[in-house]
Amino acid sequence: MPEVDIILSILGPNRPTFTGGTGGGELTPEMVRGALGMVRDADAASLLYAKVCGEVNLSEMERRLYPRWLARVAADDRDWQTPGAQPVPAVMVKMLRMVLLEYLVPSRCPRCSGRKTTYHRASKTDVPCYRCHGRGELPLKESERAQYAGIPMPAWHSRWSLHYRRLHAWLDELYASAAADLYRALR
């Protein structure tokens, strides 16, 4: 099962193996499926699976994550707790969709075609791509994000870009917690 190999690749060099017992010491797909079921946060587990395996059901992810993000923003941001400063739900839905798309389906770098490296003729070796800084993907520009969300640039820079970065950081936290839970379950 290829997605099991991909999920195991996130464990990197710390991939657990087992000694003793009747098995050969390697993880089986059944073990990994069981470990994914042990991830404490179901939303984090589905985010991990979507990011690693590339199988994205965007509308389902939006439906599950939007109430949690809205509650988190309301708890963190005192400006939004005052009357008249409430968030615009349509903008928040667009922002969540945009961040999920950028997070789960990033655009490939046109310079290296997602390979993360380019050939350097002088040294005759592959070097990290200078355009994407060796990531293989290019994030959207700030102006593209503001345009997608339907927000003027001054408003984007003054208020919404902070919420964009917070949402991206929150998705990173969910992903990291799911990966840690998966690793603990497979140890």
Image (cartoon, rainbow, N blue to C red):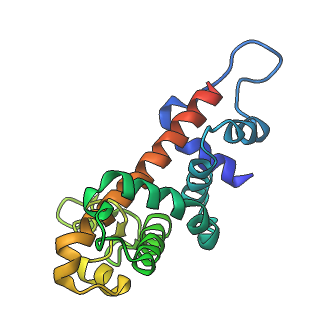
Q: Is residue 53 left or right of residue 122?
A: right
Q: Residue at x 54, y 58 (%)?
A: 51
Q: Residue furthest right?
A: 22
Q: Is residue 115 left or right of residue 65?
A: left
Q: Is residue 49 left or right of residue 11?
A: right
Quadrant housing residue 154: bottom left
- The residue sitting at 50% across, 65% down in the picture is 104
Pinpoint residue 13: horizontal percent, then vertical percent.
Answer: 49, 33
Residue 51 falls left or right of residue 150: right
Q: Is residue 107 above or below residue 82?
A: below
Instruction: Examine the rendering and report whether any part of residue 62 can be seen.
Output: yes
**Rendered view: 152 above or below 175:** below
Q: Position of residue 151 (x, y in %)?
A: 29, 84
**Frontmost residue, 67 versus 65:** 67
Q: Which of the pair 68/57 is nearer the observer? A: 68
Q: Which residue is depicted at the point 53% across and 61% down?
A: 67
Q: Give the position of the C terminus as an image quadrant.
A: top right
Q: Is residue 131 visible?
A: no
